[in-house]
Amino acid sequence: MPAKFAALPGWARDDMRAAWPAFMASCGVLVKRPDWKESCTIARQVNADSDKAIRLFFETFFVPNQVVTADGASTGLVTGYYEPLLHGARKRGGPYQTPLYKVPDDLVSVDLSGIYPELKNMRLRGKLVGKKVIPYATRADIERATAVTGKELLWVDDEVEAFFLQVQGSGRVQLTDTQETVRVAYADQNGHPYKSIGRYLVDKGELTLSQASAQGIKAWIAGHPTRKDELFNANPSYVFFKEERLPDPKVGPKGALGVPLTPQRSVAIDSRFLPLGAPVFLSTTQANSEIPMQRLVMAQDTGGAIRGPIRVDYFFGFGAEAAENAGRMKQSGAVWVLLPKQAPAR
């Protein structure tokens, strides 16, 4: 629903300079599209050090559109994610017994939009048996079977952290045998839908909704070690990784848009409803708090758990503080997507 910038809570107070590098990163991709070319080209002339100039740019060339659901709701769920640090080795041994896997050779991935344009952003994953594509193995099957044996990328020392690495989608691994730190990035997924293990524990009566944070789930696992596999297998989705160099530790991992994520200025969205790369104004509250958090962010990533028009995953960055905030982020929020004036809202 088209709105005025004056209607965006906190718009005038946000520091536009903090959002500008993330927007310019988006433009590196969006400038190739006809509806974004003009605004992204003009953006190159804007003074990046001037909050006033950046704000004027957005107010001149964009229209904020409040996102509402089909049933008229104007708020949704805002969670958080981060880039974790794990400890591992290139070879199995000692405490390093949990593998991170590369994409298996028999995983088939089909972009359905090539056959059915109406299925844009939909991808079929499975395994080819004869002339048929059948569902790929679930998490439980992968853990039990030998189908992925030999596709180990790295070995880490913590099975719980390896599971949460799959939820985050990417991370860093400090290798003790080679004394290097590498990034492990999302490469593909087994095709099964993501199921929240926090929701599983709530439905089982093991945790309350307020207790089902990352911290609460890890505490539950520590107290119920024999039920760890049961819990993990409640999520049939399984993520495969690829290794990337880490030349600059200050640069975030690449999101679905293909550009590095900017801590506290990048978010993951459902690209079926919001255009990937677009500026989004988010009005929510800080993690586990009622303190307002209202700022311009960029829709630069997607995620298996991010489903729905008002569903945002806020990227907190790397480090202990980012992990703490991301684990506790489960707030209500409203969203406005900023679209170039010549582009119709959808």
Image (cartoon, helix red, strand yellow):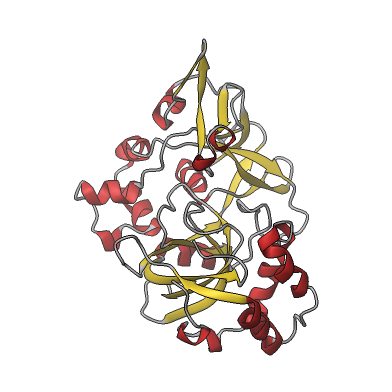
Name above or below for residue 213 compared with residue 19.
above
Quarter-wise, where is residue 229 in the image?
Answer: top left
**Residue 203 appears in view:** yes
Q: Is residue 202 found left or right of 78 in the rendered image?
A: left
Above-or-below relation of 295 to 215: below
- Residue at x 71%, y 57% (from the top left corner): 29
User: Is the residue 84 above or below the residue 338 in the image?
Assistant: above
Q: Is residue 12 left or right of residue 25?
A: left
Q: Position of residue 307 (x, y in %)?
A: 41, 52
- Seen from the viewer's position, the closer of residues 58 and 10 is 58
Taking the spot 24% from the left edge, 52% from the top edge, the residue there is 202
- Residue 264 can be seen, yes or no: no
Give 266 or 263, whichever is nearer the viewer: 266
Front one among 7 and 312:
7
- List x then y, in percent, for residue 16: 63, 81
Using the image, determine if residue 142 lies above or below residue 224. Answer: above
Q: Position of residue 63 (x, y in %)?
A: 56, 75
Residue at horizontal 48 percent and vertical 51 percent from the top: 272
Q: Residue at x 42, y 25 (%)?
A: 141
- Specify the quadrant of the image occupied by residue 36: bottom right
